[in-house]
Amino acid sequence: MAKLFAIYQQPKDAAAFDSYYFNTHVPLAKTLPGLRSCEVTRGPVMGMGDEHGVYLVGILEFDSMASIAEAMGSPQGQATAADLANFAGAGVKVLMAETAKI
């Protein structure tokens, strides 16, 4: 199993971000080949005492890192990545890793 984590920074206009993210970006991301599931954080993203600017984390699950690479290299993946410029002006970090339940 592998996951892609999209970590979005606090937008200037949270309502506009949410509208675009949930009505346009999420449906686009759900077309990624090999996508097994999607999750999104709800409410504040908390730290261990430090303030930070994280607004929302999207978590996409795939079978493997190779599946993520194939998905992101596909036309749907290219479109999803390009779409970030339309709403994630405050910044987004995308991380990927193999995962295991322990």
Image: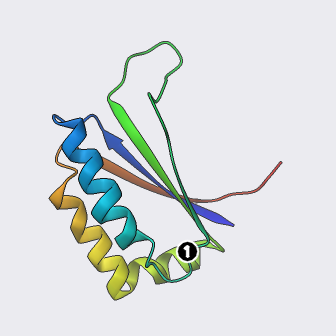
The answer to whether 79 is drawn above or below residue 102 in the figure is below
At a point 19% along the width and 53% down the height, the residue shown is 87
Neighbor class of circle 1 (other Cα within 10 Å; few <14, some 14-19, many 20+) is: some
Q: Nearer the viewer, residue 15 or 80?
A: 15
Residue at (61, 72) in percent of width and height: 36
Residue hosting label 1 = 35
Where in the figure is residue 78, as x and y percent of width and height?
30, 78
Q: Nearer the viewer, residue 14 or 97?
A: 14
Identified at 28% across, 64% down, the residue is 24
Q: Residue furthest bottom?
A: 75
The kind of residue on which mark 1 rests is Leu
Q: Is residue 65 left or right of residue 7?
A: right
The answer to whether 12 is drawn above or below residue 87 in the figure is above
| Whole-percent x, y for residue 60 in the image | 53, 62
Q: Position of residue 54 (x, y in %)?
A: 37, 33
* Residue at 58 percent of width and 72 percent of height: 65
98 vs 49: above or below: below
Question: Exactly how many numbered labels are in the figure?
Answer: 1
Which image quadrant is residue 16 in? top left
